[in-house]
Image (tube, rainbow, N blue to C red):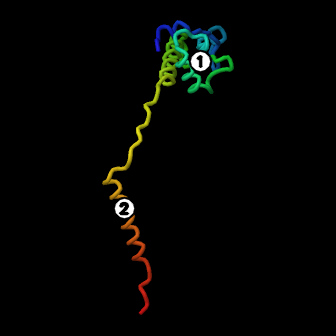
Amino acid sequence: MNKERIIQEIRFKAVRSSGAGGQHVNKVSSKIELIFDLLHSSALSDSEKQLVIQKLGSKLTKEQLLLMQCDTSRSQHKNKELVIKRFLEVMEAALLVPKPRKKTKPSKAAKEKRLKSKQKKAEKKLGRKKPPME
């Protein structure tokens, strides 16, 4: 994943932030919306695109756009930095390929330990029985 190329393909949109404000609230667009077009991206290979679609399918629109937004700060520049950082974290997580699991068998010691614990439980239960009548 080439971060610089991906960042160049991102589109940004400044929107008015919701919530309580003050005198300046209706004039400033501090909320940032990040739009990434996954299908038309040249920074990702076809296999990487499929992996991202598979992992982030619920977060994508019908047009395969990834939309993210940030309005935590009052500064538009700070919100832009934060949303880019979050976007890169999401993309790195989506492109991470898990290592294949190696099948293993239980060790000899583990098998013996399990059998001993079973025997101990069986003896404990046998001890609960009524003694035979003579």
Q: Residue furthest bottom?
A: 134
Q: Is residue 119 left or right of residue 19?
A: left
Disc 2: which residue: 115
Query: Residue 116 is drawn in which quadrant?
Result: bottom left
**How would you rate the neighbour count of disc 2 (Cα within 10 Å): few for under 14, some for 14-19, many for 20 or more?**
few
- Helix, strand or loop at disc 2? helix
Label total for image: 2
Query: Could you say where residue 99 lies in the image, as x and y percent from the top left?
Result: 43, 31
Query: Residue 23 is drawn in which quadrant?
Result: top right
Disc 1: which residue: 69
- Helix, strand or loop at disc 1? strand
Query: Could you say where residue 109 lies in the image, as x and y percent from the top left?
Result: 31, 54
Counting residues from the start of the chain, the first of labels 2 and 1 encountered is 1
111 and 9: which one is in front? Answer: 111
Q: Is residue 6 above or below residue 95?
A: above
Q: Residue furthest top?
A: 8
Badge nearest the viewer, 2 or 1: 2
Q: Is residue 68 visible?
A: yes
Residue drawn where x is 62% and y is 9% of the image: 13
Q: Amino acid at mark 1?
A: Gln
Q: Is residue 31 visible?
A: no
Q: Is residue 92 left or right of residue 65?
A: left
Residue drawn where x is 41% and y is 85% of the image: 131
Q: What distance separates the C-alpha of mark 2 from that of mark 1?
A: 56 Å
